[in-house]
Amino acid sequence: MIAAIVACAAIAGYLLYPIAIHSIAQKIRESTGVQVAKKAPDFTLKDASGKRLSLSDLKGKVVLLNFWATWCGPCKVEIPWFIEFEKQYQAQGFTVLGVSMDEDGWKAITPYVSEHHVNYPVVLGDEDVNQRYGGIDALPTTFVIARDGKVSAIHQGLPEQGRAEYEKEIRALLDAGGGERPGI
């Protein structure tokens, strides 16, 4: 009888261990990762010309912060949307900031950006920015950031409603003002 109870407890522990570990890992990530309504972590990275660009340089704008890579299929779907958003909403205080996570660096990024006529700033990501954003597990990962620097939405992969979902979020922040305005 005691052996059966011990065996059942051992099996239960064996089966519940992965769930417990996953739960703990999720809580750690939530406490260290980026969350909606919290300030987006600042970072400084270099663009193709070596110029340093900080997220804080864009304060006062609505920012679509996109972690991507040239080899990422869903990223290739989104980039044309982002090019259009940049054209359509830039004058209203909006910008896209692309953070490429390509391991080949500018050797891969520069031809891609040129070929696709990317019209917004692109910087090369590193492990530090990856960690500041809680560890980017999926590409694309996109943060929609209000004028006051707080995260309004987070998307891992393509949003369910596609381009329309991003556009709705961008317009809402632009229409609401979302905090500080450029030049104020």
Image (cartoon, helix red, strand yellow):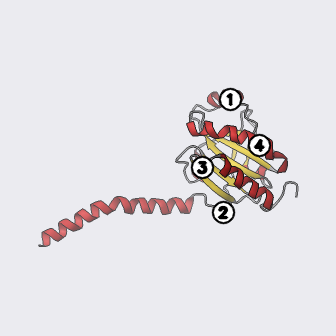
Residue 56 % position (x, y): 75, 52
Q: How far apart are marks 3 and 1 (CA)?
A: 26 Å
Q: Position of residue 60 (x, y in %)?
A: 80, 55
Residue on which disc 4 sits:
86
Which residue is painted at 67% across and 49% down in the image? 164
Q: Quadrant of residue 12?
A: bottom left
Residue denoted by label 1: 110
Mark 3 vs mark 1: in front: 3
Horizontally, is 184 left or right of 167 in the view? Answer: right
Task: Examine the rendered structure and indicate whether residue 13 appears above or below residue 144.
Answer: below
Please report the residue visible at 66 percent of the width from the left and 46 percent of the height from the top.
163
Q: Quadrant of the C terminus?
A: bottom right
Residue of label 3: 159
Real-space Cα separation, disc 4 to disc 3, in angstroms: 18 Å
- Give yes or no for contact between labels 1 and 4 (Cβ–Cβ under 8 Å): no
Query: Residue 155, image x and y in percent?
Result: 60, 51
Marks 2 and 3: CB-CB under 8 Å? no
Disc 1 crowd, CA 10 A, few/some/many (<14, 14-19, 20+): some
The circle on residue 38 is: 2
Measure how far apart labels 1 and 4 are at the Cα level.
Answer: 19 Å
| Farthest right residue in view | 183
Q: Nearer the viewer, residue 12 or 126?
A: 12
